[in-house]
C-alpha cells in the first residue's frame, strides 16, 4: 500500500488537543503522513521529510506527495444517524408541511409501503447513491438504520442491505407500529412481541445497534424498554430516538440503559440536561429535522454549557430530514443552535465517533483511520459562512483518495 504525504495544509483540524490548539487540536502549516490506510504522523510541514526517514518510510522519491495548497483539512465527517434504505419519497408531505401541516410520526407508514414494494436492486441502487452523495460531501463513516420494513423478512432485508456499506448498522424494527397491527386492539404490544422475538433474531446477525422511537405516536417508555433490553440480551448496543415531538421520559430511559446516544433531544427538561451531563450518553442533535419540520431548534449551547457531549448527524430520511449534507447541518447548528463553528465541527466528527463508540474515526492522530477531507477554503468557519456551497475538494477514506 502506498505511503502518502499530504502537505501544505494551511489549517489542520485533528480533534486531538495534545497535537494542536484548543479542543479541536488545530495546527497551521501542517502535514500528515498516511501509511497502510492509517495516519502515521502529524506535524509541521517542515518536519515531514525527517519524519518519513525516522519512520523508515522513505525514500522520499517513492512517496505519493500531495499538496493541500494552503487549504483547510479536517477529519472525515462521522454521521451517526441515518435511514437510507427506503423506497419512494414524501415530497408532497414536505410541501404540505411548508403550507402549515405539522409533522407526525405516522408518515413513516407511507414509506413502509413504498419500501416493501421495492426490489432489492431498487433499494440497493438508492442506498449506494446516498453513500456516494455523502462521501462527496465529506462523510466517511455512516450509521444506517432499518425501520421501513416492519416485518421479519422486510427488516432483515434492510439490515442486510445496510451491512453491505457500513459496519454501523442499527436494527430499528420499533420505528412505528405498522398499519396491520395498529388497526387492532392490543396490536402495539403484539408488534413489540414480534420485534423482540423473531424479528430481532433475524436482524441481530447483521446489526451492531438496537434503536427504538420512544415517542407519543410510536412506542411508550415501557415498550421501548422491552425492545432495548431484548436487543441488549441479543448482543446489540442501545441507542434511542427520544424527545423529538415533545417532552418525555425517553432520554432518562436511554441513560439508564447506558445508551451510546440519545438522538433528536428537541424538547429537553432541565432534569434531562442534568442527567445527560452526568452520564456517558451523547446527545445527538439533528439540525435537518427542525429545518424540515419547522419545529423549534434545540439549543446546543445549553447542552454544551452543562457539560453534555454533543454530536450532530443528518438523519437522512424521506420524512423529517431529507438532507445528506453534514456541511449544511453544521451551518444550521451554528446559525440556529448556538454552537460555534469549532463546536459544530467537533460534534460532526469526534462527537459522531463517540456516539458510535469508535476511537478510530473522527480524529486525526497516529493510528486512526486516514479519513480526511480537504476543503476548498482556508478555514472550516466557511462551512457555516458559505451555506449551501459545495466546499469539499478531496476526500481520503482509509488512506485512499475517493473524491477529487
Ligand atoms: O429520525 N423519528 C423517527 N424517525 C425518523 C423520521 C422518519 C420518517 O418520518 O420517515 C427521524 O426523524
Ligand atoms: Fe431517525
Image (cartoon, rainbow, N blue to C red):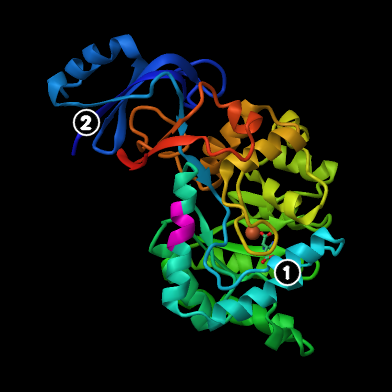
The answer to whether mark 1 is within 8 Å of ligand 1 is no
Q: Position of residue 175 (x, y in %)?
A: 65, 69
> What span is colored magenta in the figure?
128-132
Q: Position of residue 215 (x, y in %)?
A: 77, 64
Q: Position of residue 36 (x, y in %)?
A: 24, 37
Badge 1 is on which residue? 92
Q: Secondary structure at mark 1?
A: helix
Badge 2 is on which residue? 3
- The number of callouts visible is 2
Residue at the far right in the pictured view: 100
Between residues 189 and 99, which one lies in front from this camera angle? 99
Between residues 163 and 209, which one lies in front from this camera angle? 163
Residue at the far front in the pictured view: 389
In the image, what residue occupies the spot 70% across and 77% down? 177
Q: Is residue 16 magenta?
A: no
Q: Is residue 349 above or below residue 266?
A: above
Q: Secondary structure at mark 2?
A: strand
- Mark 2 → mark 1, Cα distance in angstroms: 50 Å
Query: Magenta stretch mostly in which secondary structure?
Result: helix
| Picture quadrant of residue 338 | top right
The answer to whether mark 2 is within 8 Å of ligand 2 is no
Amino acid at each position: 500500500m502506498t505511503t502518502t504525504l499530504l502537505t501544505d495544509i494551511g489549517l489542520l483540524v485533528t480533534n486531538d488537543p495534545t497535537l494542536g490548539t484548543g479542543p479541536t487540536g488545530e495546527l497551521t502549516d501542517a502535514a500528515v503522513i498516511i501509511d497502510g490506510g492509517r495516519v502515521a504522523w502529524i506535524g509541521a510541514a517542515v518536519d515531514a521529510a525527517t519524519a518519513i526517514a525516522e519512520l523508515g518510510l522513505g525514500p522520499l522519491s517513492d512517496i505519493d506527495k500531495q499538496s493541500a495548497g494552503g487549504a483547510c483539512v479536517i477529519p472525515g465527517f462521522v454521521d451517526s444517524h441515518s435511514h437510507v434504505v427506503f423506497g419512494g419519497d414524501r415530497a408532497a408531505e414536505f410541501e404540505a408541511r411548508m403550507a402549515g401541516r405539522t409533522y407526525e410520526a405516522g408518515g413513516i407508514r407511507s414509506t413502509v409501503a413504498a419500501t416493501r414494494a421495492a426490489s432489492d436492486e431498487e433499494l440497493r441502487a438508492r442506498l449506494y447513491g446516498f453513500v456516494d452523495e455523502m462521501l462527496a460531501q465529506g462523510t466517511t463513516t455512516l450509521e444506517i438504520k432499518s425501520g421501513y420494513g416492519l416485518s421479519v423478512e422486510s427488516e432483515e432485508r434492510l439490515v442486510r442491505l445496510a451491512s453491505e456499506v457500513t459496519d454501523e448498522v442499527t436494527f430499528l424494527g420499533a420505528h412505528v407500529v405498522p398499519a396491520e397491527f395498529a388497526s387492532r386492539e392490543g396490536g402495539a404490544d403484539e408488534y413489540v412481541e414480534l420485534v423482540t422475538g423473531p424479528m430481532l433474531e433475524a436482524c441481530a446477525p447483521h446489526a451492531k445497534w438496537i434503536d427504538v422511537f420512544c415517542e407519543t405516536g410510536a412506542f411508550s417508555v415501557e415498550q421501548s424498554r422491552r425492545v432495548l433490553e431484548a436487543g441488549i440480551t441479543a448482543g446489540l448496543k442501545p441507542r434511542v430516538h427520544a424527545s423529538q415531538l415533545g417532552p418525555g421520559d425517553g432520554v432518562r430511559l436511554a441513560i439508564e440503559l447506558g445508551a451510546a446516544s440519545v438522538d433528536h433531544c428537541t424538547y429537553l427538561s432541565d432534569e434531562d440536561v442534568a442527567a445527560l451531563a452526568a452520564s456517558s450518553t451523547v446527545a445527538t442533535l439533528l439540525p435537518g429535522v427542525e429545518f424540515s419540520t419547522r419545529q423549534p431548534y434545540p439549543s446546543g449551547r445549553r447542552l454544551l454549557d452543562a457539560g453534555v457531549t454533543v454530536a450532530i448527524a443528518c438523519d437522512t430520511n424521506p420524512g423529517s430530514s431529507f438532507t445528506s449534507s453534514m456541511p449544511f447541518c453544521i451551518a444550521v447548528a451554528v446559525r440556529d443552535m448556538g454552537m460555534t463553528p469549532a463546536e459544530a465541527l467537533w460534534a460532526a466528527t469526534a462527537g459522531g465517533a463517540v456516539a458510535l463508540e469508535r476511537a478510530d474515526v473522527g480524529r486525526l492522530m497516529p493510528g486512526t483511520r486516514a479519513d480526511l477531507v480537504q476543503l476548498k477554503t482556508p478555514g472550516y468557519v466557511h462551512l457555516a459562512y458559505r451555506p449551501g456551497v459545495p466546499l469539499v475538494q478531496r476526500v481520503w477514506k482509509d488512506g485512499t483518495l475517493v473524491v477529487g
